[in-house]
Amino acid sequence: MRTQFILLAAVLGVAPMLCAQHAAKPPIAIKATAKGEIPAGPAITDSAMCDDAGNVYSRPFGPNSVSEYLRAPIVEITAEAKPVGSFPSEGHTFFVRGDRVYALAGPPPSLSVVEFAQDRSVKSRTKLQLDFFVQVSLLGVFKSGEYLVVGLAGTITETAPHLRTPFTAVFAADGRLVKKVYDPEDEDARQKAEGSDPKYFRCCSDSGNEFVGWNADVAAGSDGYVYLMHGTSPPLIYVISPAGDVVRKFQVNVGNPELTTNSIKFHEGRLAIGFGWVGDLPESLIKVIDLKGNSIADYEIKEGARDSDPILACYNADGFTLMPRRAGPKPYLLTAKLP
């Protein structure tokens, strides 16, 4: 699931590698404007995304229960924070592509991709060719119709699951397994999680790996690839083809190890990465890069974001839309226009 058991407790995680080496430019300050109060009580949101019309989708849930997370529906609101409707809970994670909403559903290993119709009913349910337990965290949908599934694999014991091994695979539109992705960085992440490296593993559980955990995300490009951002610092991005090949990978130089990612979005041949701040640092940062990881611009949001730890939900020609990750009594949807 997108928020793993350990992360819920913690809230109460081929081509040569490229790394942009350009001199850092000072961030551009932009102002976040509240568009309206979100119709949801105090909650946590682990992901947010938009359709082509600018409507925002998220799954706010209470922090105290895994079952509450699994029951949480996908909520749709307009860019003005007006409620549109909700999709029935299908558990696990969801993805929006174009004007279509998809969800990953079912008890592992019997996982299916659910596609919703425009009236929010279930249009189709595609069972994935998977015969072992995977704790899923991310779903991506390729332009050509294939699915990218990301999560954790390992062993299941009578007492507790032991899941530290990153799992990434591409499935065909009919559910057939196309190819698993397991590069040297995945094995390195497994070893570091097994060794309790704090950058990869949080305490108090036999499962978890930040490589594919709370701070990881996926974005589907109009170029036909899916961009998988791993939850490490600095961010590591795999560019994955519908055939399951990692066509390239790169790290994003942010210059501050305290920054943690929360979202990646694709727009017109560029990627925008949202970062949350730690401690007594400025409000929020969005980094825009090209498709090889080279920096284009950094945007620092200094107003209106401190209390909500916003997630980057939308990136389009107008700018950015941000959804509170940890909503207070009055959670607001935020927008920030590009200068």
Image (cartoon, helix red, strand yellow):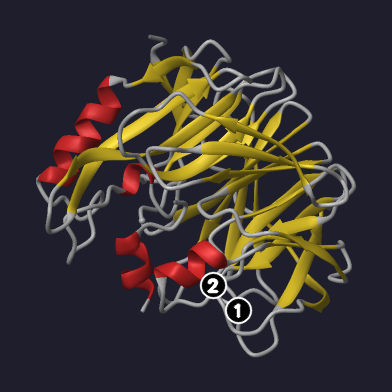
**Residue 174 versus residue 102 in the image, above or below:** above
User: For the residue marked with disc 1, what is the amino acid?
Assistant: Ala
Q: Residue at x 58, y 15 (%)?
A: 242
Q: Position of residue 39 (x, y in %)?
A: 76, 79
Q: Are marks 1 and 2 in contact (CB under 8 Å)?
A: yes
Q: Which mark is residue 327?
A: 1
C-alpha span from label 1 to label 2: 6 Å
Q: Position of residue 10 (x, y in %)?
A: 32, 70
Residue 32 appears in view: no
Q: Position of residue 73 (x, y in %)?
A: 65, 63
User: For the residue marked with disc 2, what is the amino acid?
Assistant: Ile
Residue 290 appears in view: yes
SS state under label 1: loop
Q: Is residue 324 left or right of residue 92?
A: right
Instruction: Farthest residue to the bottom: give it.
Output: 329
SS state under label 2: loop
Q: Is residue 33 left or right of residue 139?
A: right
Find disc 2 in the rendering and name its residue. 44
Q: Residue at x 62, y 63 (%)?
A: 59
Question: Badge 1, how many Cα within 10 Å: few under 14, some, many 20+?
Answer: many
Q: Position of residue 209 (x, y in %)?
A: 28, 47
- Front position in the image: 19 or 121: 121
**Residue 240 versus residue 260 in the image, above or below:** above
